[in-house]
Image (cartoon, rainbow, N blue to C red):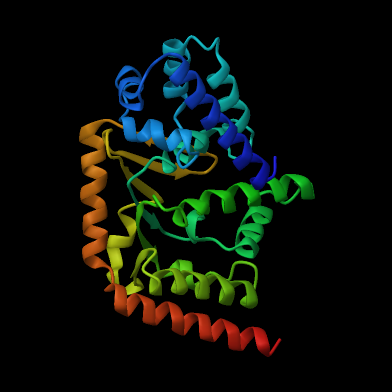
Amino acid sequence: MANGSRQVAWEFFGVELKRRREDAGLTQVELGARVFVSGGYIGQFEQAIRKPQLDVAQRIDEVLQSDGFFERTWRKLIDDRRYADYFARAAELETLAAKICDFAPALVPGLLQTAAYAQAVTIAMNPFAPDESIEKKVSGRLERAQILKDATRPVYWAILHENVLRIPVGGAAVMAEQMEHVAALARERTVLVQLLPYSAGAYALMNGMLTLMEFEDAPPVAYTEAVYSGNLLDNPAVVKRAQASYDLLRAAALSPEASLALIESVAEDFRRCASTT
């Protein structure tokens, strides 16, 4: 399903939710209380600004007695194989997060990737996949990044290891565009980016890829990923340890200003390299 078509479908989901809620004589606050979210969230679901989690869609069906309509619609729109099974739940939570913190040890985080960079990464990880499959995965990744353009976008903080700047994914032109994109987002203050330099030493060995997510009305979670596997962590003690590790990485990283200067310098180097080849 194309991005535009999916958005229209979510708008239909919202219109139908509002209609059935009003038919049941419930306000947004009253429905929210029964399905354990805020009334504001119900309003955002109805306006297709946010997307509900599966368990919320199921509870809406129970309260409105809609015979599974909202669960079936959710599954059609969310569970469409754009993401690997182990990442689908984390991708769903990204759309609900009030704050997202990423640590990337080797690759640009998905929310910051350009189309060309995402394609190069996807092909490298799926060298025998048909073009249609590659395009679907890239489209899904770019669609995830739309949350940074929404009016309700989360606070987004990324710590990138210097490896991310030095590994030439897709070639010099692709890397130049990717670094320029990250720099532009940082300059616009859409995101906050810090670099963990090689000189930080052992700090870089403390974590693999790590994502922390905070929510307005739910406990924080952490997500880690290894080869073809991912772990969504919600145990409070474990999440607290992950947050502490992130704080140490942040303390060892360059300042946002120094990080931006280095990203722009690397972008210029890749651009010069691309122009001479």
For the C terminus, the quadrant is bottom right
Measuring from the top left, give residue 99's x and y in whole percent. 32, 49
From the viewer's perspective, tell me whether residue 5 is left or right of residue 271. right
x and y percent of residue 49 in the render? 46, 42
- Eyeballing the image, is 3 above or below 104? above
Q: Which residue is drawn at the image coordinates 42% and 23% (left, top)?
A: 56
In the image, residue 272 lies at what x, y percent?
A: 60, 89
Side of 159 relative to 164 (left or right): left
Above or below, comparing residue 200 to residue 273 in the picture: above
Figure label count: 0
The residue lying at 38 percent from left, 82 percent from top is: 261
Whether residue 158 appears in this view of the structure is yes
In the rendered image, which quarter contains the N terminus? top right
Nearer to me, 6 or 64:
64
Kindly identify the residue that appears in the image at 26 percent across and 60 percent down: 249
Q: In the image, is 156 to the left or to the right of 184? A: left
